[in-house]
Image: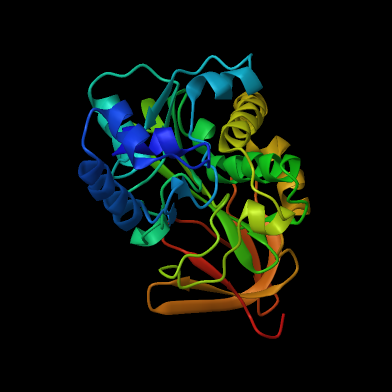
Amino acid sequence: MLTLLKLLKDGRFHSGEALGEALGVSRSAVWKQLQLLEAELNLPIHKVRGKGYQLASPLVLLNADEIVASAPSLTWPIRIFDSIDSTNAEALRLIESGGAAPFLVLAEQQTAGRGRRGRKWVSPFAQNVYYSLVLRIEGGLRQLEGLSLVVGLAVMQALREAGVQGAALKWPNDVLVGRKKIAGILLELVGDPADICHVVLGIGINVNMQKADEVDRQWTAVGLETGCPIDRNYLAARLSLQLRDYLGRHKASGFSALQEEWEQHHLWQGKAVSLIAGASQVDGVVLGVDRQGALRLSVDGVEKVYSGGELSLRLRDDS
């Protein structure tokens, strides 16, 4: 089925006979595969008598060589999958099987993509970036302090390079444009964080997605913000270079060296918010983050600090 898709990706018309010859199957078998493409990958295909079959729009698939061409100094091994449960899950399996970090896992589609707090990450085929970078961490907890916030800075800068000038940060793991989410980050760790461990930096970016009925929150995408589709290979390359730069600065100087920069780009700095943990809620005003990346809130005039993977921040209506 994916071989057929690669024949159609140029967006031109191809006759059923020519497709059948290229695949070594009958025209009826081609027709069945086309139906599967539409149903399973949600890719609209135009059918015109006398012309053949055409994708509604040309498709640029992920390609490791093209990513490296846009970032020739990048040395991370890149593994690309047509369809996978999730790039983070595959990264964790590769760590378990002895894969040497750093390495990068990308996918055209995730069948079980996940975000923070167990949420589903909607992952349509060949529309977005599903990206997991595996790092080996030595030197203890200091190398993990504020790491998700550092990744957020790299994602934000890559989006701005791609033309999304309104991209900004929301503590702790989101990149927004206004109130709409454009990217999310999920970090997963295996090993001993006080000694040697591996961390998976999972990043999902909405790129060329036009609609997503399954998403129950406000969202946007690079193409919607810029008015034109973007090559995901280019975006993956720029993201990788930004990550390499920010991770290098973080490793050398810790999160404290990036704390001020992060606060400058925090969309909700000084805003009235609600911090939610399970059934409990704390209302306050965002003061910023501390040297470890924890959230600083003014609660009834008293500064309090909060951190933890299960916390969720919401903007209050009066902000």
* Image vertical order of residue 145 relative to residue 138, above or below: below
* Image vertical order of residue 316 relative to residue 134, above or below: below
Residue under the image location 50 percent in, 18 percent down: 76
Residue 80: percent from left, percent from top: 40, 29
Marker count (numbered): 0
**Where is the C terminus found, in terms of image quarters?**
bottom right
Residue situated furthest bottom in the rendering: 318
Residue 117 appears in the figure: yes
Residue under the image location 69 percent in, 51 percent down: 228
Q: Nearer the viewer, residue 194 or 242?
A: 242
* Quadrant hosting residue 81: top left
Q: Nearer the viewer, residue 241 or 37?
A: 37
The answer to whether residue 39 is left or right of residue 61 is: left
* Quadrant hosting residue 315: bottom right
Q: Nearer the viewer, residue 168 or 274?
A: 168
Q: Nearer the viewer, residue 68 or 140?
A: 68
Residue 190 appears in the figure: no
Residue 134: percent from left, percent from top: 42, 29
Residue situated furthest front in the rendering: 50
* Image vertical order of residue 221 relative to residue 274, above or below: above
**Where is the N terminus found, in terms of image quarters?**
top left
* Quadrant hosting residue 301: bottom right
* Image vertical order of residue 3 relative to residue 129, above or below: above
Residue under the image location 59 percent in, 29 percent down: 240
Residue 63: percent from left, percent from top: 49, 26
The answer to whether residue 142 is left or right of residue 14 is: right
Residue 305: percent from left, percent from top: 58, 61
Residue under the image location 58 percent in, 61 percent down: 181
